[in-house]
Each structure stands twice: as C-alpha cells, then as structure tokens.
Amino acid sequence: MAKKRIFSGIQPTGNIHLGNYLGAVKNWVDSQEEYENIFCVVNSHAITIKQDPKELHQKTYELAAILLACGIDTQKSHLFIQSQIDEHAALAWILDCNIPMGDMSRMTQFKDKSAKNPKNINVGLFNYPALMAADILLYQVDGVPVGEDQKQHLELTRDVAMRFNRDYGECFKIPEPLIPKVGARIMGLDNPESKMSKSSSGANHAIFLLDSPEAIMAKFKKATTDSHTTIVFDPTRAGLYNLLSIYEIFTHKSRESIEQEFAGKGYGQLKSAIAEVVIESLRPIRERYERLMGDEGYIREILAQGAQSVRPIASGTYERAKELVGLV
Ligand code: ATP
Ligand code: LTN
C-alpha cells in the first residue's frame, strides 16, 4: 500500500524553540518512515511581519540546517523553500477569491499577531491562512503535523478545499490535522499561561534549540511554578504541568513512574533533572548544526533538489485549479 503523504511548514523568523520542536519538528523526524514527507521553510509567510531582508535570507538557510540537524533525512523527506515554488502564491490568490471575509476574520492568530505588531497590520498578515491553505492543498496530502495553535487554520483549509471541490469539481485532497497528544502546546517558562513563542521577548521565556547547556539550565531553574509541594500531573497547575510534559516526552517514561520518581522531592530537583535531559537531547542537534553551517553550498544544493522534486506535484494541482475556475 502506498504511504500516506504529509506536509508541514515552519517560518524562518526568530529562533526555533522547544515548542516548535516538540509540537512539530520532532514528530516530523520520528514519523519519517511511516509517511511520504514534504517539509517547507515558509519564508513567504515570514514577510507578513517586517523582516530585515539580509537577515531573512540568512535565517532561511539556518533554519534548513537546523531541520537537517534535528534529523530530517533527505533520503526519506523532501525539504524546500516556499518562495522557490511560485505556485504557492498563485494558488493562494485563487483560494482568496473563494474564502468569505467572515471566515478569515475569525482567525485568532491574526488577532494575536496584529495586537503584537500594531504598526504593521498588513493585508498579507490577514491573508496568511490562504497562503497556508495553498501550501497544503498543492501537494494533495493526507495529513498536516502541527501544534495545537494551527488547528483553526487547518479547519479553514479543509473548508475552502471542500467548497472548491463542490463548486468547481474535484481538485484537492482534504487533509487531516495531526496534532500530538503531548507537546502540542508548550507554554512559556516565564508565563505558563501563554504559549512558548518566538516573538515573546522575555529572556527566560523560551528554550531555543541552539541554547548553550548553561543557558538551558539557568532558564529551567527560573521557570515559574507554584507554591504547592507535590509533584503530580495536574493540568490546573500550568507551570508544573508544562515542565512535567517536557520531561515525559524526552524520557518516554509513564506519568506514574515520573510521579514516583519525584515523590517527596522539591521543584529544584525536578528542574535540574528536566534541564539535564533537555541538554543531552539537544546536544547532538547543536553539534550537527555547527558542522552543517560550515557548508552552506551543501544546504543550498539540498534545498534546490527538494524544490525540484516536489515542483511537478505543485504545478499539476495548480494547473487543474486554474482550468476549473476558467483561467487560461
Ligand atoms: P511563534 O512561536 O512566534 O508563534 P509560530 O507559531 O509562527 O511562531 P512557526 O515556526 O510557524 O512558529 O511554527 C512551526 C510549528 O511549531 C507549527 O506547527 C506550530 O504549531 C508549532 N508551535 C509553535 N509554537 C508552539 C508551542 N508553543 N507548542 C507546540 N507547538 C508549537
Ligand atoms: N502557519 C504556520 C506555519 C505554516 C504551516 C504551513 C504549517 C505555514 N504553512 C503549512 C503547516 C502547513 C504557523 O504559523 N506556525
């Protein structure tokens, strides 16, 4: 039986953090055997927020190197840069003309991001989900592995695809969201009420994948918890629950055995144990990244091959969509 196909994307903005890794990238890596994989550095999405052009260019290659360092294997997965395939923006236009304003206006990410960037609330930021829908629908995929925050965008993607198929004729496969049971919403270490985010500025907010061991230890030590004394998986104790979930994912231990391990121990011991596990898990990623960044030509070559290998799928879908709506 043919493998199911998946697609996912990540923006080359800010620094990739533990939330991106546990909510998305680690799952891409772990399920590479199971699926036919298409992964994309979505640089066109990044310009919905003002970027320094040179820095964006650099960050795009850096992020590709980090994904490879995390274990994306180009023998098993396609990896490419969004702006190298024109059909993404072109299909987004056709979808734009088939998404009601009311549906788009409900997107909470737009509300959050425009509140954070009040001086640059541009049409692209509003329209962002149409470009994301195009990313996915171009490749006729079965699933989209993402964190919890992208669920609403995937619903919009499914709605526009179903409406298009009904109104013009069969064109798009309807994708399912693939959201992990644990890790889909990693919270900020400084504020466990808000999701860990690249765009939050607090020094102690996020663990970045390229952080030094010392920085990781210091950030976990300062993580916000509460004034209780027991160490248990209780979702109402957001800070502790977040830390325990991170430990659970990295150690693969059961919740009961983790609770037993820390019975009678304090938050200080818990935080050190988590920091150590995270440091050891991220160490090989940082080391591989440093080796890869020494050879930018190699990264470019991999990305060019990635784009070349998936372009026929994208252009096949785009040509069909164009024909169905009557564009010559
Ligand atoms: P920001 O963190 O600034 O909001 P973003 O969500 O725009 O950035 P992307 O790089 O586009 O970040 O996201 C890549 C993937 O990481 C997406 O699948 C997203 O759902 C996931 N993700 C982002 N933040 C978290 C988080 N805190 N916990 C779990 N998954 C997350
Ligand atoms: N919108 C996502 C990034 C993204 C994406 C995609 C994810 C762009 N295109 C396609 C999955 C599939 C975000 O903001 N995290």
Image: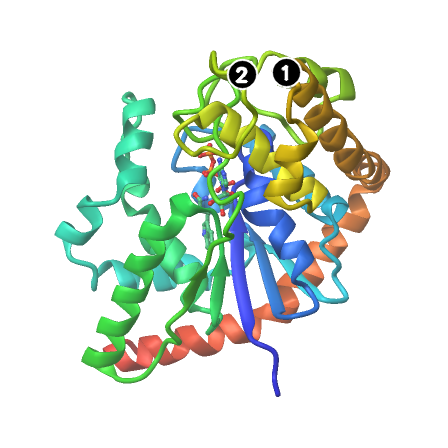
Element at badge 1?
loop
Inspect this view and state whether residue 52 appears. no
Looking at the rendered structure, which numbered label has been put on residue 266? 1
Choose top left, top right, bottom left or bottom right for residue 1: bottom right
Q: Is 308 drawn above or below residue 55 in the view shown?
A: below
Colour mapping used in the image: rainbow
Q: What residue type is labelled 1?
A: Gly
Residue 177 in percent (x, y) is at 42, 60
Choose top left, top right, bottom left or bottom right for residue 218: top right
Nearest the viewer among 8 and 314 is: 8
Q: Residue at x 56, y 16 (%)?
A: 223
Nearest the viewer among 90 and 224 is: 224
Residue 130 in percent (x, y) is at 32, 55
Nearest the viewer among 187 and 107 is: 187
Q: Check contact, mark 2 vs mark 1: CB within 8 A.
A: yes
Q: In this view, does 184 lie to the left or right of 213?
A: left
Tell me the quarter of the image containing the C terminus.
Answer: bottom left
The residue at the far bottom in this view is 1
Residue 198 in percent (x, y) is at 51, 29
Q: Residue at x 29, y 21 (%)?
A: 119
The residue carrying pointer 1 sits among few (fewer than 14), some (14 to 19) or many (20 or more) residues within 10 Å by Cα, namely few
Q: Is 196 drawn above or below residue 107 in the view shown?
A: above
Q: In this view, does 179 lie to the left or right of 281?
A: left
Q: Is 37 drawn above or below residue 316 in the view shown?
A: above
Residue designated by label 2: 229
Inspect this view and state whether residue 290 appears. yes
Choose top left, top right, bottom left or bottom right for residue 283: top right
Residue 276 in percent (x, y) is at 76, 26
Q: What residue type is labelled 2?
A: Thr
